[in-house]
Image: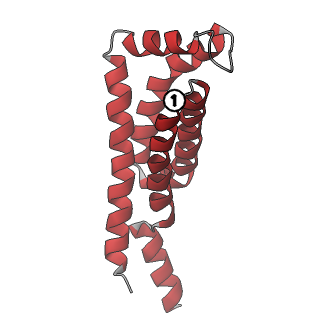
Amino acid sequence: MIDKRKLAEAELVSRWLMALILLTAGISKFFSAGGFKTYYSGLFGNEGLRLNFPAFTYDIYLTLIPFIEVGLGAALLFVALKRYTIWAWYAFMASLLVGHYILQEFSAVNQMLIYFILGMICHVLPTKAEIKTLNTKARS
């Protein structure tokens, strides 16, 4: 059986890696001088896409993405929020995956799957607090 301490450490590393990914992505977008939004607005505005949406729909979301990334990244650093941040991670990654489908960037869609797997690893691994709770219940 795997040592419970190692499981908790792996959970911490996976959760902090998720936070690092989001914080780095969000902060870099804030310092792109609008380049991120301009680039993706141009892609979503392509008339040759199979699905076309009004510009305001993707412009709003593209504006929100850096805030979501920084906020969710910071929240992932707090173990007490894990229960909620994992589901927020899944939802956010799903939204990015759908965006790449809309842009017909199918290789990017495939590459996104690893982010879901990282979330699942973090999801199933116990935190130190969860291990302590289980140990306390086992002694009772």
How many C-alpha atoms fall within 10 Å of the one at disc 1: few (<14), some, or many (≥20)?
Answer: few
The one nearer the camera, 139 or 69, is 69
Residue placed at 36% from the left, 82% from the top? 2
Vertical placement of residue 56 versus 74, above or below: above
- Name the element at disc 1: loop
x, y (%) of residue 102? 61, 26
The answer to which image quadrant residue 104 occupies is top right
- Vertical placement of residue 139 versus 131, above or below: below
Location of the N terminus by quadrant is bottom left
- Locate residue 105, reporting x and y percent: 51, 29
In this rendering, the answer to whether 137 lies above or below 51 is below
Residue bearing the label numbered 1? 105
- At 34% from the left and 65% from the top, the residue drawn is 10
Whole-percent x, y for residue 126 in the image: 45, 68
**Against 134, is 41 above or below?**
above
Relative side of 105 to 11, left or right: right
Residue at x 32%, y 41% (from the top left corner): 20
Amino acid beneath label 1: Glu
